Image (cartoon, rainbow, N blue to C red):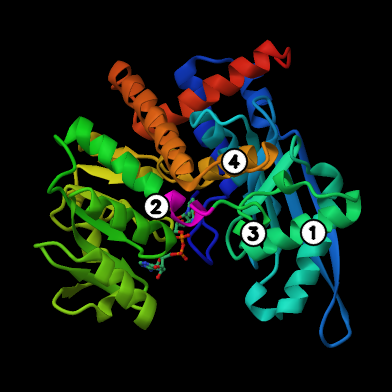
Amino acid sequence: MVRKLGEKALDPYENAVMQLKKAVNVLGLDDEAFEALKTHERVIQVKIPVRMDDGKTRIFIGWRAQHNSALGPYKGGVRYHPETDMSEVMALSMWMTWKCSLLQLPFGGGKGGVRVDPRRLSFREIEALSRGYFAAISRFVGEDLDIPAPDVYTNPQTMAWYIDEYYRIIGHNIFGVVTGKPQQLGGLGTRIVATGFGVAAIAREAANKMLGGIEGKRVAVQGFGNVGSYAAYYLSNWGAKVVAVSDSSGGIYDPKGLRIDEVMRVKSEKGKVIEYPDAKRISNEELLTLDVDILIPAALENVITIDNAPKIKAKLIVEGANGPTTPEADDILFKRGIFVVPDILANAGGVTASWIEWVNNRTGGWITDDEAMRKLEEKMITAFRTLYSYMNRRSDIDPRTAAQAVAVERVYNAMKLRGWI
Ligand code: NAD
């Protein structure tokens, strides 16, 4: 993804298509295959009238993009954002197809969005909007058809409204129609840690392969939110030395290693990591070029650029955030021999946990938290090993293109078997 928050850079759909073209070329597929892989199966635009608190009706516009279902029902989040548009959800749904395929989940790719600034709506208005959106797309979702989940500015409460609205429409409970639900409604207790844990598990596996193990390795994490904080937490538990973390207020650095449980406490009590005592304050830009072994961008898009890529000292970058590296920076890092574990693999812990939740809902809810974590770890590590061995065979291509090629090839093969190509 190439959009900075609040700023349209390259059209995200064009970017997704360009990336697909690269993977198609690596695989040696022809134009017929490219067209078939590129084209969305369905893109729905819906009108959502909402009676606002002042009594007036406001019209919102939403979308659900369903890119490809060769491997299974569409899967992907719904975002509420003032700048979401059809191009964005189309791009994101295509990336979901590749992400699910790479992780060998039985899903295709979908994504939804509503053009709204939810911070300007009351709780009741957001509920009305959420119910209206789900009712409008209800004929096109289902536990075997399309399974939404939370994304930017949507959360387990939003999912609870979705399943309840679905219940009203079809007349009985189908909890597997969305994932990321509250635990009382069939959600997974471990969902909150899943993405950060997955990032950490991949970083550990990559360090085992490339850096001689995770023990004592110096790690810097940009962004101490849901993904970054749990990635830092697990890595420090596994013996890595997390020397720097940051949030939007700035960063902290201690070459001897930060006490991550203490940083988490400070962040939750005071809202800023810079309130942590005994560490040097650094800027977010400085964090990226610190002398560390592993760098984990887990905040925003487009932070590793043509300007700072030549100065990065980490040997391994694990992309917790979506799209933290620009295409130009990717080329520089690849030439410098820095291994970038791409976002579609590194931050796939969330969708993998979603798959476990969906299976659990459909089998009557038997999975324990321990089993869910074990399964998550196994899936992430298997996907990393597949990518790594592919890279050993094709050292001429960068890891992002390799990951896309692995994913695209599986979708292509499924489409061929089904007679779609
Ligand atoms: P979050 O809102 O919980 O945390 C974001 C963190 O980034 C916060 O600590 C915030 O202070 C920090 N931040 C904001 N602006 C910053 C800046 N200019 N410099 C440094 N830090 C800044 O979000 P999250 O859920 O942790 O998501 C982080 C990234 O991971 C996003 O790109 C998201 O799309 C991606 N992601 C998240 C999940 C998930 O399950 N949460 C799954 C896949 C991908």
Give the percent coordinates (x, y) of residue 48. 84, 64
Residue sitting at x 26%, y 77%: 274
Q: Position of residue 363 (x, y in %)?
A: 67, 36
Instruction: Let me know if residue 193 is in the magenta part.
Output: yes
- Which quadrant of the figure shows ligand 1? bottom left
- Dominant secondary structure of the magenta stretch? helix
Q: Name the residue rendered at 86%, 45% in the picture.
A: 139
Mark 2 — residue?
A: 196
The residue that mark 4 highlights is 366
State the separation of the CA atoms marked 3 and 1.
Answer: 13 Å
Query: Is ligand 1 within 8 Å of the beta carbon of the residue shown at mark 2?
Result: yes
Circle 2 or circle 4, nearest the eye: 4
**Mark closest to the chain's N terminus, 1 or 2:** 1
Q: Secondary structure at mark 1?
A: helix
Answer yes or no: disc 3 within 8 Å of ligand 1: no
Tell me what residue is drawn at x 49 percent, y 30 percent: 102
Residue type at tag 4: Trp
Q: Is residue 65 above or below residue 133?
A: above
